[in-house]
Structure formats: C-alpha cells, structure tokens
Image: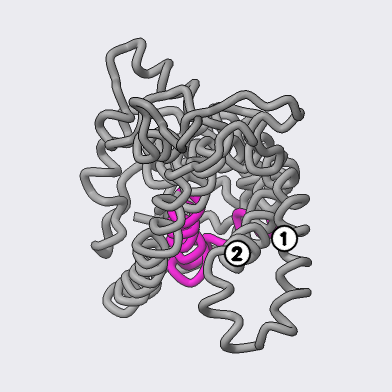
Amino acid sequence: MPGDALGTTSDAEIWRAVRQGVSGNVSIPDKKAGVLVQSEGESWRLLRNGPMFDYLGLAMIATLILLALFFAIRGRIRVEHGLSGVMIKRFSTVERTGHWLMALSFIILAISGLNVSFGRSVIIPLIGKEAFGPISEFLKLSHNYVAFAFMLGLAIAFVTWIAHNLPSRHDLVWLAHAGGLFSEGVHPPAKKFNAGQKIIFWLVMLGGLSLAVSGWALLFPFEHSFFGDTFTGLASIGLDIPALLGLPQPPYSAILEQQFNTVWHVVMAVFMICVIFGHIYIGSIGMEGAFGAVGSGKVDLNWAREHHSLWIDELREKDAMPPAAANPEPAE
C-alpha cells in the first residue's frame, strides 16, 4: 500500500495467524505447502529429542534391571518333580511358524527402530559417522520390508491362538496366586494358556496392531488421518481425548498426523520391547522346560502337569496322550 501503510492490519497479527498453522491454497499437488509455518513441529522436536526418549530409554533399562533382580531372588523356576522324559506335543508346526516369524521379525524391527531413535547419541560415539551411515541405511531398509513379515506373523498367531486366549474363570484363580511365580510348590490350574500367557497374547496382539497401523502411516506418509478420525469417533461417544491431553482439536494437517504417528509408534514400540523382554526371560532362563514349546513343539509331561494341569486333563479325555504317558507319576 502507498506509504507502506497497513491500515488496520499489523505484521504481528499476520504472523500470529501464520504461526497458528493457517492453511492457504496452492496450485501444486502437494497441498501441505499451503501451511507456511507449522508450529507444532517445534513442540514435536522438543518432545522427541528430549523427555520422551529419556523416559523410554529408562523404561527399557528398568525392565532389564527388574528381571535381573527377580532372577537373583527367585532363581530359575524348576520342574519340582523333575523331568519325566515323556514328551507331549504342545504346538503344531503352523503355530510355531507364526510365533517365530513374528518373534524374529520383531527383533529386527526393534534393533533397526532403536537405531533410528538412539543411534545418533549412542552408536555414533562408538563406531563413528562413517560406519554409522551405511549401517543405518541398511537397517532402515530392513525395517521397512521386515515390517510386512511381522504383520503376517501377527495374523497367523492371532488366528491359531485366539480360541485358547479367551478369558475363563480359571484365570482368576491363576492371578490370585500370581501363577506361582513367587512361591515354590504353588501351581494353580490352567488350560493350554494360563492367565499370564493370555495377558501377553493380548498385549502383543493389540500392541502389534497399533504398531502396524502407525507404521503403515509412516511407510505411506500423508495419505491417512488415523488420529483425526479416531479422535472424532471417540468424541461422538463423549470421549474428548485432545482436551484431556491438551492437544488441538481435529481435523489435523497431514504433517501433524505424521508427527502424532512417529510419537505413538516409538512409544508403543518401546512398550512392546519391555513386554517381550519379560516374555523372553520366562520362556528361556526363567523357567525350566518352557522353551521346548516353541522350539521343538514338545514339552515334558511333568512340566505340563505343573503349569497346565487342565490342559493335560483335556488331552486325556480326548485320548490324545502318548502311550508312555498313559499312567504318569503325579506331579503334585
């Protein structure tokens, strides 16, 4: 305007609107360019590089310390009546395939994902930038492609084990005795999966699904609005999540959706890592005879009687016990 007069409009008001993420119109295909300044990006960066990763790192370290203390105090949970030498089939080849496909792919995803999150601060000082670059590129590609193997393993495990992981009245008894994990000689009755295994199952299924959805949005960026759609759906039943968390109300820009996805993905990933730490511990050094279930697919009869007595009763009723176990020595 002549004389550089702005009339009733000031620079402060213009830039305040810009900082609030006002979206303009653009003629190019990339509609994200309509947002000149996305202020939430600063908040996302401060959270991502600051307290979030500090707390997530501490959570993983604390989980390992707790497991080490538990092992030091409780020791390995032994089969109290000793191994009988009679092996019975626990998991089929299909079940074990789904388990190991999910497990091995998750380990690769965890290592490659942690490198993205902590590599700059932890790995670079150890190996240098020259080695870190190509290693990170390989891990990034591995993360992107192995993700589909994890989704497939998750689906197989869900289909094959869902029927055995529905709640039952026996779970309350198992939980009341903490599964005998803290006491010797205590073996609450359980079917093929006890309450603790059911909890792990549902944490892995729901957590894995959440990881898959947020990961899909990161693999194919700026194409989905999962957070905006979810918050809008929850608001329709009276649950205003953005208000509870101090977040802006939907709809969200494509960039903000991606920032939400990155935060949620890494938080859920570390949560899953902590859960799997416990699962690996109890299935290996934590409990004698447990690994055979997913290793060879067979377990010792006395182990099964102590930890899954109701399942043994079901096998006997179906006449599915091996001949050598027709008259087993009692495990109690």
- Can you give x and y, in whole percent of width and height, for residue 207 in the image? 49, 41
Q: Please tell me how crowded label 2 is: few (under 14), some (14-19), or many (20+) other residues with Cα within 10 Å.
A: some
Res 219 → quadrant: top right
Tell me if 262 is positioned left or right of 307 in this view. Answer: right
Total tally of numbered discs in the picture: 2
Q: Which residues are magenta?
A: 268-296
**Residue at the (60%, 68%) spot, across then down:** 115
Residue occupying image coordinates x 75% and y 29%? 28
Element under label 2?
Answer: helix
Is 53 in front, or is 47? Answer: 47
Residue that numbered label 1 is attached to = 140
Are dots 1 and 2 in contact, CB under 8 Å? Answer: yes
How is the structure coloured here? Answer: one colour
Percent of width and height locating residue 314 = 50, 33
Which residue corresponds to the image point at 63% horizontal and 37% vertical from the top-left? 217
Extreme residue toward the front, this view:
3
Q: Position of residue 234 (x, y in %)?
A: 37, 18
Residue 249's place in the image compared with 54, above or below, is above
Where is the C terminus found, in terms of image quarters?
bottom left
Residue at x 46%, y 37% (from the top left corner):
4
Q: Name the residue carrying label 2.
A: 116
Above or below, 156 relative to 41: above
Badge 1 local density, few (<14 within 10 Å), some, or many (20+)? some
Give the SS element for disc 1: helix
Q: Judge whether residue 276 is colored magenta.
A: yes
Q: Nearer the viewer, residue 49 or 147?
A: 49
Camera-side residue: 143 or 6?
A: 6
Is-magenta flag for residue 277?
yes
